[in-house]
Image (spheres, coloured by chain):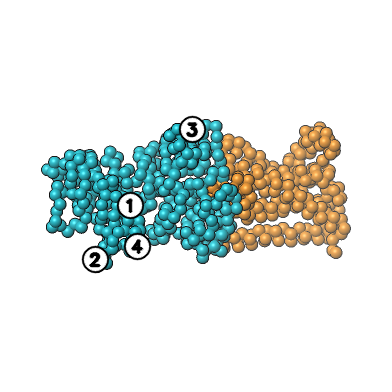
Chain colours: A orange, B cyan
Amino acid sequence: MFLTPDDQQALWLTVRLACTVTLILLLLGTPIAWWLARAKAWWKGPLSAVVALPLVLPPSVLGFYLLLAMGPNGPVGQLTQALGIGLLPFTFWGLVVASVFYSLPFMVQPLQTAFEAIGARPLEVAATLRASPLDAFFTVVVPLARPGFMTACILTFAHTVGEFGVVLMIGGNIPGVSRVASVQIYDHVEAMEYTDAHRLSAVMLVFAFVVLLALYARRAHVGKND
Amino acid sequence: MLARMTEMTGIQARFLLVWPGFTLDVDLDLPARGVTALFGHSGSGKTTLLRCIAGLERAPHGRLVVNGEVWQDDSHWLPTHKRPLGYVFQEASLFPHLTVLGNLRYGLRRVTGTQRVNLDTAIELLGIGPLLARHPDHLSGGERQRVSIARALALSPRVLLMDEPLAALDLQRKQEILPYLERLHSELDIPVLYVSHAPDEVARLADHIVALEAGRALACGPLGDTLARLDLPIRLGEDAGVVLDAVVAERDAAWHLARVTFPGGSLWVRDGGHALGQTVRVRILARDVSIALHPVSDTSILNCLPATVDQLAPDDHPALMLLRLRLGESPLIARLTQRSAAELGLTPGDKVWVQIKAVALIG
């Protein structure tokens, strides 16, 4: 194997983090996207802005606030201590929480677009065919929005893999706990280990290209079918 | 007690819905049998009324009782998916991710209670057997609408709601579907509420009519009687006229004519190839009916019938008037000039002869 054990550990951690975050965001982002797609209430605008914030904010700003919130004196930190979980910063689950915020728009926005494109009619049809709203969501909306779900998951996964600033702020650089691939590359460069940095960077480059290829090849295929 | 009994069948619908620029305000008692057309121009509120009945739109003030079962009142609201109805939307509403059979089964799997129509009957009635394995994108517009109708029917609905099911189709596709709708009408005992702005569909299919304008019901009643109302002529198309249900009694192969009988007489019409004993529908426009005080023998007009003058009323133009007549139990309306009516001295109760120049066989 041309990667060092440390590099392999960092990659494995990265994959674990991205998978966990994608799964959590799938559960969390779907209802948010659904509400945003269907809502006509005044709070639709403010909620959309909050969801989109991580797109604009420097990751260090987001990481800074999360660090404060999850720290010993922050509200989240007090809660986790009270629950006996301890403090989240510099742990794997701290990274997960931070990444969930950081990647939220990449899950919500493609789903929202997909739900809006479906419109209200299929749900009305399902209701006249005796399907309850929840039933209709899983048997009509989810199948019709499948391309949206694919896009959202791929983007969320890839974006979490590429995360750097938030990780440094919240997770530091602990091998096997919070040292993900992007941080590992940074360390290699800092230590002038350019060969190692090259190898890991090449892996990331190939990964990013394959992900985007999968995304666009699928889009072209969907476009052809229409 | 009588009021209680009438509550048990049919549809009592009272809705008050206020939107910016539109108010729906109706109080209707619709029959539990046959096809009731909700007829009116676009913007008259007919689709909104249908959606209120389906529960797709919620009128804040309303009461809806279907066959004695309360679907909506001040304290009670039954969501759409719990209402035993079938709904056919204007445009194709099939689920694109399911095959035709998958679409048919979608509702069937979720329905509870007794099945009066089974899937095979619905498939057979709409003639969609060969399409079952296909996906909706590979169907024509007419085929898709037939599948939608079968999907709604397969639920054995207590009432079938159809929102301009033919409006999105061209004339040829309409002609393709109309016979299937007529079969539904004659073979199934499910009341149908049929929204339409197309006079030919209403004349062909409806037994009852609710004429809507600006969110209010102008008239509501059996089709023949309502069309023959002079105070409020509902024009199905270019002219006022009546529709009669008749039975084919005789066919004259030599002249390609058929004699159809209705309560009040019989008429010769062009032979449409219908079997003896079959029920057909004929339409007689007011402008095609003329009046004579005595039977006329030397005339080209085949249909001369005795009738009684019922009512006279002015028409749109001051030179013209509308006359309602009774042929036995059946109403008929005629348009003549004020001058002719004065010269003939027509008054209600007079016995006259009507000459009917044209009878259209519409189904």
The residue under label 4 is: B275
Residue A2 lies, in percent from the top left, at 84, 63
How much space separates mark 1 and mark 2, taking CA atoms? 23 Å
**Gap in angstroms between the C-alphas marked 4 and 2:** 16 Å
Residue bearing mark 1: B245
**Residue type at numbered disc 3:** His
- For marks 4 and 3, the one nearer the N-term is 3
The numbered mark, 1 or 2, whose residue comes first in the sequence reads 1
For label 3, the residue is: B61
Nearer to me, A49 or B94: B94
Amino acid type for the residue under numbered disc 4: Ala
Q: Nearer the viewer, mark 3 or mark 2?
A: 2
Numbered disc 3: what chain? B
Are labels 1 and 2 assigned to the same chain?
A: yes
Q: Which residue is mark 2?
A: B255
Are marks 1 and 4 in one subunit? yes
Left or right: residue B324 versus residue B8 is left
Q: Report whether residue A122 is seen.
A: no
Q: Nearer the viewer, mark 1 or mark 3?
A: 1
Q: Where B219 sits versus B360, above or below?
A: above
For the view shown, which residue lies furthest in the bottom direction?
Answer: B254
A19 and B349: which is toward the camera: B349
Same subunit, tags 4 and 2: yes
